[in-house]
Amino acid sequence: MIKQLLCLSVLVSSLANAEGVIAEGKTPHSTVSLTDKPCVNMPYTKVAYTYNDKGQTLLGCWASDESRVFVAWNDLRLTSYAFNFFNVKEIK
């Protein structure tokens, strides 16, 4: 139990310290957010997260190639999205 709480606090603190969400995509049931914060457990990737209206959230790491954005979710799923799925946020 203590180990799980420690892992959760590390995940939450890394999310809270994210430099910022750079793009978001919405489905009818959830939102996928891409940040510019480096993913510590997977080199050359950035933090991604998805959440839904029930309050469920899942973290992952994202990268892209010339055609798609790939997210390796912490539940061991790998998803890919077309670039036009995301709306890029304005830089302030």
Image (cartoon, rainbow, N blue to C red):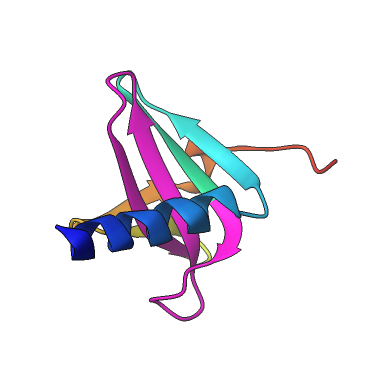
Residue 53 visible in the picture: yes
Q: How many marks?
A: 0
Where 31 sits versus 88, above or below? above
Relative side of 66 to 62, left or right: right
Was residue 77 drawn as part of the magenta stretch in this picture? Answer: no
Where 1 sits versus 39, above or below? above
Q: Nearer the viewer, residue 59 or 34?
A: 59
| Residue at horizontal 26 percent and vertical 59 percent from the top | 74
Was residue 49 drawn as part of the magenta stretch in this picture? Answer: yes
| Residue at horizontal 49 percent and vertical 55 percent from the top | 13
Q: Nearer the viewer, residue 76 or 79?
A: 76
Q: Position of residue 81 (x, y in %)?
A: 39, 47
Instruction: Please identify the quarter of the rendering in which residue 53 is found.
Output: top left
Q: Nearer the viewer, residue 17 or 82?
A: 17
Q: Position of residue 63 (x, y in %)?
A: 47, 65
Where 55 sits versus 79, above or below? above
Check the image and name the residue furthest to the right.
92
In the picture, the quarter occupied by the C terminus is: top right
Q: Which residues are magenta?
A: 35-63
| Residue at horizontal 69 percent and vertical 38 percent from the top | 89
In the picture, the quarter occupied by the N terminus is: bottom left
Taken as a whole, is the magenta stretch helix, strand or loop?
A: strand
| Residue at horizontal 21 percent and vertical 65 percent from the top | 3
Where 49 sits versus 51, above or below? below
Residue 73 visible in the picture: no
